[in-house]
Amino acid sequence: MESKKIIGVILVIAGIVGLCYGVFSLTGGEVGNGQAWGATILGGIFFLSGIGLMKSVGGGSTAE
């Protein structure tokens, strides 16, 4: 279970980086640039999949 949380965090961070890069590129006037759109779309996919993975694992910690 711990490895799923780590993968979820990595996906969320990668998604945030991709979204930031894509949005900053798009607002910088590169609307026709396919790379900016690709980074934005992939960032959104990574972000949402990371959030979904973290929700499915659960946030409660149990002390044994």
Image (spheres, rainbow, N blue to C red):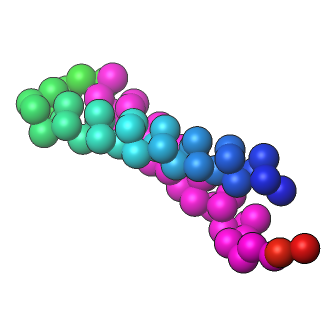
Would you place residue 34 above or below residue 54 in this image? above
Percent position (x, y) of residue 22? 29, 35
Q: Quick one: which residue is furthest to the front in this view? A: 64
Percent position (x, y) of residue 4? 76, 51
Percent position (x, y) of residue 64? 90, 73
Count of numbered labels shown in the rendering: 0
Would you place residue 44 above or below residue 28 in this image? below
Of residues 26 and 61, the one drawn nearer to the viewer in this rendering: 61
Q: Is residue 59 left or right of residue 3?
A: left
Q: Residue at x 40, y 45 (%)?
A: 16
Please tell me in which quadrant of the rendered image residue 17 appears: top left
Q: Is residue 59 visible?
A: yes
Q: Residue at x 68, y 47 (%)?
A: 6
Q: Residue at x 53, y 55 (%)?
A: 48
Q: Quick one: which residue is furthest to the left in this view? A: 29
Q: Residue at x 35, y 42 (%)?
A: 19
Please tell me in which quadrant of the rendered image residue 30 appears: top left
Please tell me in which quadrant of the rendered image residue 60 appears: bottom right
Of residues 2 and 45, the one drawn nearer to the viewer in this rendering: 2
The segment highlighted magenta reads: 35-62
Of residues 30 and 55, the one drawn nearer to the viewer in this rendering: 55
- Quarter of the figure with the N terminus: bottom right
Please name the predominant secondary structure of the magenta segment in the image. Answer: helix
Would you place residue 24 above or below residue 52 in this image? above
Q: Quick one: which residue is furthest to the right in this view? A: 64
Percent position (x, y) of residue 23? 24, 41
Q: Is residue 58 magenta?
A: yes
Q: Is residue 58 left or right of residue 27?
A: right
Q: Is residue 45 visible?
A: no
Q: Is residue 9 magenta?
A: no
